[in-house]
Image (spheres, coloured by chain):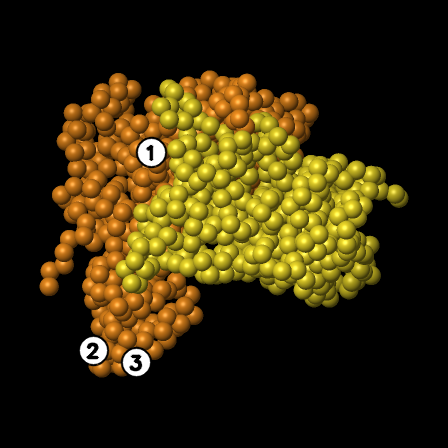
Chain colours: A yellow, B orange
Amino acid sequence: MAKARVITPQEVDFPRWYQDVLTKAELAENGPVRGTMVIRPYGYGIWERMQAEVDLRIKAAGAGNAYFPLLIPEELLRKEAEHVEGFTPELAVVTHAGGRDLEEPVVVRPTSETIINSYFSRWIQSYRDLPLLVNQWANVVRWELRPRIFLRTTEFLWQEGHTAHATEDEARAYALQILHEVYRQFMVDVLAIPVIAGIKTPRERFAGAVNTASCEAMMRDSKALQMGTSHELGQNFARAFNITYLDDTGAEQYAWQTSWGASTRMVGGLIMCHGDDAGLRLPPSIAPTQVVVMLVRDQDGAGEVARKLVNQLESAGHRVRLDDRVEQSFGRRAVDSELKGVPLRIEVGPRDLAEGRVTIVRRDTLTKLPTPVGEAGTVATTTLDKMHSSLLAEATEFRDARIHDVSTLGEVGEATAAGWARLPYDIVGEDGETSLAESAITIRCLTRPDGTCPETVDEEGLIAYAARAY
Amino acid sequence: MAKARVITPQEVDFPRWYQDVLTKAELAENGPVRGTMVIRPYGYGIWERMQAEVDLRIKAAGAGNAYFPLLIPEELLRKEAEHVEGFTPELAVVTHAGGRDLEEPVVVRPTSETIINSYFSRWIQSYRDLPLLVNQWANVVRWELRPRIFLRTTEFLWQEGHTAHATEDEARAYALQILHEVYRQFMVDVLAIPVIAGIKTPRERFAGAVNTASCEAMMRDSKALQMGTSHELGQNFARAFNITYLDDTGAEQYAWQTSWGASTRMVGGLIMCHGDDAGLRLPPSIAPTQVVVMLVRDQDGAGEVARKLVNQLESAGHRVRLDDRVEQSFGRRAVDSELKGVPLRIEVGPRDLAEGRVTIVRRDTLTKLPTPVGEAGTVATTTLDKMHSSLLAEATEFRDARIHDVSTLGEVGEATAAGWARLPYDIVGEDGETSLAESAITIRCLTRPDGTCPETVDEEGLIAYAARAY
């Protein structure tokens, strides 16, 4: 029996495939205000696990969570010139509140550098107050002209870290520590997404930063997605907000700062990096449900076996769901578990059981593994263990096969039609970057020739990755 | 040596005491936009633990987290008449965004019934889709004329649950399940705050609800604080948003609904229920740090003993902080740990150690317990275990001594000058409630004579609690 297609194949129309997955897997949908989104419970379950894993790593890096107000006086935003210039076109402004017009309009935060730094300037007095390492989980609003769910939305959820340090070296090192130990490690170890960690060209820098580093991933349509960024702010905000400290000689110094963020956009990246024509494919460590035990028919003790298996798998520490909705079509339930990317499905039915077996179906390969009932728990555990590295290897292979080394600017267009171009940064130059931008191609990031992340764009011999991007 | 007073005593000026604790314990401060607040890392650490504990109980009650947009079209808000009337005076309105004036202004959510129910109407088709149980952790904005940090702020953080059910009985039972199994249980078992769970009079109901239940706690100035509410919405929103389902006979029915919320206001309640003239007193289960091991001087192996003790306590599952800032005054560090309400302080110094001892200081009683080094871990654990019930008993005794039974309306004023009045609801009546309101006295909630929470205000013989409230 051929399965009816429930979603558009990726090859046919990737954006429609993405939209179909969002809808059919009940991940998210459009909000009533243009560009906003509703994150449905299944999508939010994925985000919650992302939050928990990222938060753990942020705390390990020494930062504590805090919360700053959503509403920022316009005057505060104007204090850092480049910053306000970068964000003004995207601002949402509250002009009326509590039944009357406000004397001074307030903006809904597009990011929180300005409000947080106005407090840092009060909290920081001496070198003993440094480093100050603060993170916040929050919603931000940036008015989007071309919104797309999870990838570019008028409101999104994120964490934004903000830190102040006594020296430039320390701030630079911390920005890179966050890039590597929080973002890259999380993306590789939890999301199974291979990322290239590099720094941005001056053109692509965050408004107000002296250096922006990012993690870039390739989606299955070969476009790039910026998955998280970490900025070195130098003393730009410290000067604008007067964040000074007395050093151990009693001299007054401006602090050196960083800021860094990762958002619900990562959910979009997860979908587009691993998804296939059957829907989502979730690595076990991020999946809200790791194993669904699916009762085919409640007959000949099958229900009992299914429930026992659920208990056994839960005791082994897995997140398990029992699907005993036998009144609904088995085929539809199976398709639904595939759409939702549940890593393992264990089908428990009387026919298999008569032969002492259940069927384990891997979501990543869609292979069916008939397994003796008594071994199902162990096989599930070892299969889940393998699945992460298998998804990571597949995504790495997919990406590496689509990164084309080129040696002239002229070749970049063709190379980025279905992949990324890699070329010496010297060849690109500022003019080259401008002309690529006319074809919607951007330099995603710069690395050293050995693939490591440079400290500044001034290092010699950097390599540029050029791509079309979300 | 008499300690210098670091905060205003409660007896002298309770509001100043509260403000002093907020500042000196580095919990929170005012934001730049009137009525908003900055929650500092220590204050946010308390909120994070509240979130985790409440979230656990919400999930156990079957609700899943989701996220709906911050910005709501004005038109949506207008759909439920009582609701819009209740919230209009407090709305913040975005009229300008993305560089131009909006055709239709959007409001910043004051609560999310309207936007969530507009999605429920799409998601619910048949009785099989019910119950639909959704929760969201979010910020909301209500323009406040008399703001006070944590208690009443223009922006606050909360969870708001929204559910739809097939029958009135089921909705009513679920609203009460949330009240008891999520809110009351959390407040008593985690915050050590005794609460009275009852229902509101029609005057005090949530705008758009048919019944509001709440948990009310007494603060140490004897005023009442509403700590969390659970509403039965009847079919009001279902009719306004056309939330219908086909029942098992194929007939179309309106759904029955609930909504319920608890917010950062609980942090204020925690401070004011347990705090004393030395600052915060945190029950161990909510304390970000349960034990601070404080090195007096790093001499004669004291540092080594302190570090070992930290490891031992961490292995026992406690949240422990080592304070080895020996270059700072010991007295100041001790005062700081008391201000912050850390349940236990273990002082490790060479003088005590010479006699084989450390000193354990309980924050709740401020008693000092010289303890043999080898027993310090065990004593700490048993003391922490006792501290929760001890704080709960103290707060219960404090409250019960200040609840005065009265039998006429005329006595309520005196009884509520330094406590609450308890009287038959029949005696109050609608007019009585209005006249009490003129003296800023409100009926906090109604219970049955045996103290249990009634299902509706129409039950006979209900008891009213009258008080001044935050």
Residue at 51% x, 56% y: name it: A175
Q: Residues within 10 Å of mark 2 (few under 14, many from 20)?
A: some
A378 vs A222, nearest the viewer: A222
Q: Position of residue A51 (x, y in %)?
A: 54, 50
- Give the residue type at disc 2: Arg
Residue at 20% x, 63% y: name it: B331
- How far apart are labels 3 and 1 at the CA level? 50 Å
Q: Determine whether the residue tagged by mark 3 lies in a helix, strand or loop.
A: loop
Q: Determine whether the residue tagged by mark 2 lies in a helix, strand or loop.
A: helix
Q: Is residue A51 visible?
A: no
- Give the residue type at disc 1: Gly
Q: Residues within 10 Å of mark 3 (few under 14, many from 20)?
A: few
Q: Position of residue B437 (x, y in %)?
A: 25, 24
Residue at 59% x, 36% y: name it: A153
- In this rendering, position of residue B44 left or right of residue B225: right
Residue placed furthest toward the right: A1
Residue on which disc 2 sits: B351
- How far apart are labels 1 and 2 at the CA level? 49 Å
Residue placed furthest toward the left: B1
Q: Determine whether the residue tagged by mark 1 lies in a helix, strand or loop.
A: loop
Asked if disc 3 and disc 2 are in contact, CB closer than 8 Å, the reply is: no
